[in-house]
Image (spheres, helix red, strand yellow):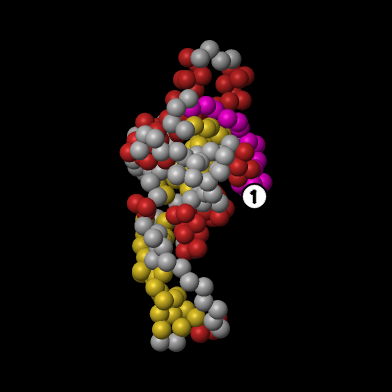
Amino acid sequence: MLSQQVLHLPPQKLFLSCSPLNVRKIPSFVNCKIGYGHSFLTVNALKLDELPPNALRRKREPQWRGGFSLGLDLGLARTGLALSKGFSIRPLTVLELRGQKLEVQIINIAEQEEVDEFIIGLPKSADGKETPQSNKVRSVAGRLAVQAAERGWRVYLQDEHGTTSEAMDRMINMGLSKSCQQKKLDAFAAMMVLERYFSTSGQGTELVLPKNLELQAKLQRGPPKDVDFFSDED
């Protein structure tokens, strides 16, 4: 468990000492100490294995109750969304927004749909290497992770290579018209991201972990339980 204390000390005498930990290019920290003068207060950073994705938890604990997973296919102008708890994955919508407006709308949709984790498609080439678009996706994922952590929600990155082609094939097999395919392609691509995520039980996903230790503590506690859904024994 995380241990936390609030120190009200003059900022000029307060310093932070941490050992760096690089996890797939995402900086995090372990063994952090908040120092004041010659005294130290140790604050434990969150361990990555303490936050397994929903897909893995459901495999380990079939009766586990959790929220929905929101799949995202981030594009330059359009973002596709899909929703699932591991079965009946469905395309949700396509957002034609960018920047802060996009992130705010994603959070709003997550609240409406009782989401507690985001599965964001990470562009990669056929040989598994990241592309120039990968950096842009990582930037959005990082900002979204901060807002999500405030609510106890998690953000994961999932390799999305080939999901657009898979989405197109799926829509053709369903007999959707070309105009419908064009409108729904991004949402179906997000659905393919979720299908890959659940089919592998979340193996290979990358947790986007906020640097802030208070946010990490909120992540470990998770979202508030719905009193109408959970019994007192849960």
**Which residue is at the far top?**
175
The question of residue 99 being in magenta is answered with yes
Q: Is residue 44 above or below residue 49?
A: below
**Which residue is at the far front?**
232
**Quarter of the image where the C terminus is located:** top left
| Residue under the image location 60 percent in, 20 percent down | 180
Q: Which residue is mark 1?
A: 100
**Which residue is at the far bottom?**
37
Residue at disc 1, secondary structure:
helix
| Residue under the image location 50 percent in, 81 percent down | 14
Q: Position of residue 34 (x, y in %)?
A: 44, 76
Q: Is residue 16 above or below residue 55?
A: below
| Residue under the image location 51 percent in, 85 percent down | 13
Q: Position of residue 165 (x, y in %)?
A: 45, 26
Q: Position of residue 135 (x, y in %)?
A: 48, 49
| Residue under the image location 55 percent in, 34 percent down | 81
Of residues 160 and 221, the one nearer the viewer is 221
Q: Position of residue 70 (x, y in %)?
A: 52, 37
Q: Is residue 220 above or below residue 121?
A: below
Of residues 230 and 202, the one nearer the viewer is 230
Q: Is residue 183 left or right of residue 141?
A: right
Amino acid on which the number 1 mark rests in the picture: Gln
**Quarter of the image where the N terminus is located:** bottom left
Q: How many marks?
A: 1
Q: Which residues are magenta?
A: 89-105
Of residues 22 and 225, the one nearer the viewer is 225
Image quarter of residue 44 = bottom left
Q: Is residue 224 left or right of residue 37?
A: right
Q: Is residue 147 visible?
A: yes
How many residues crowd around disc 1 within 10 Å: few (fewer than 14), some, or many (20 or more)? few
